[in-house]
Amino acid sequence: MRIASSLRNLPIRAPALVLVAMLAVPGLLLAVVKSVPELPNPGQVPVTKQEQEKLGLRVAGEVYQQMPVLPDSDPVARYVQQLGKRLQAVIPQQYDWPYQFHVVQQKEINAFALPGGPIFVNLGTIDSASNEAQLAGVLAHEMAHVYMQHSIKQMRKNQVPNLISGLGQILGQMIGGTGGALASIGGQLGGGILSMKYSRADEAQADSVGAIIMYKSGYDPRQMALFFETLEKQGGGGGPQFLSDHPNPGNRYQAVSKEVQNWPPKNYRTDTAQFTQVSQQAQRKRAYTAQQIAQMAQSGQIPNGSLPAGVPRPGTTGNA
């Protein structure tokens, strides 16, 4: 009878003993409650996904008219595409976008994302990244802007000074689904989006969402914050162009580190031989300064070939 009584009491005593053990060993309870981060719901905007994709492709056409972009078949561009697809693979299907990844032949450090998925990264950014994880961090951060639909949300707030007047009316036409609205946007709205500056709240959110994308892809999210903070310290060394479009939300590295410490530990992928090779190739590519690019654009001498599939030529209403 005593044995049977002891067996009946065992299931009750066992959890209590485990709890006592966790409380007795510092850090054990914290390790148990760590959970894998999940990407948030990006929320709703009154512009459909299809309309955002069309807008992004139209503005991408403006990019090709204003900036020298490596052919997508170039080895450096192909590497960036592969890296981007590795990051994209962790995004849930219901929140995914048709991301594109392109490389601009510009010396200054910069990267930007367009509504619907097109992302452009400068050769200068690839040159300045110390390892693959840092470049992945730049891409993940830009992907997060698309994921959270920051461009569209900024436009609706009408906080972008260079957007054309009557933006509300154009958005209203877009919401109605009229093809003429997209055609009427043209280069003016494209220029407004390209000159868009995110808010510090947007940047903090892109850091947070980008960190989750990196973690799920096997990269240390702190490398993203470390790269941005390195740019901040460079001052006149090429960082200001990127940082003017992506204002520092403050305590970037500390904020990301605090977020990561609550996630299960991983053996992170930091660098690869392929990144080293591509970084060397990128350094040998011809890269132009922003001033040179502006002069070429003004004279209509941007050295771009054919546009990527789906990107319409400026001034047209259909696809290229």
Image (tube, rainbow, N blue to C red):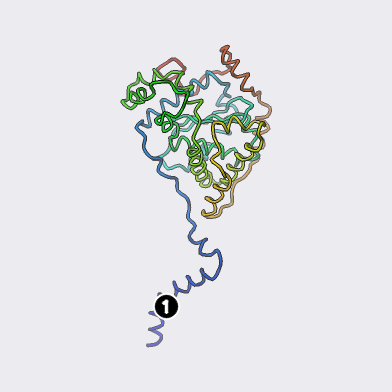
Q: State the residue position of label 1.
A: 10
Q: Classify residue 269 as left or right of residue 22.
A: right
Q: Badge 1: few (under 14), some or many (20 or more) residues near its Cα, within 10 Å?
A: few
Q: Classify residue 110 as left or right of residue 56.
A: right
Looking at the rendered image, the quarter that the N terminus falls into is bottom left
**Residue 274 in view of the camera:** no
Where is residue 27 shown, x and y percent of the image? 55, 63
Where is residue 100 shown, x and y percent of the image? 49, 31
Looking at the rendered image, the quarter that the C terminus falls into is top left
Q: Report the residue at 33% width, 23% height from top.
A: 173
Q: Report the residue at 66% width, 25% height from top.
A: 285
User: Image quadrant of residue 294?
Assistant: top right
Q: Report the residue at 44% width, 29% height from top.
A: 159
Q: Nearer the viewer, residue 23 or 300?
A: 23
**Residue 317 in view of the camera:** yes
Disc 1 residue type (three-letter) = Leu
Instruction: Please tell me whether residue 269 is drawn above or below residue 78 in the rendered image.
Output: below
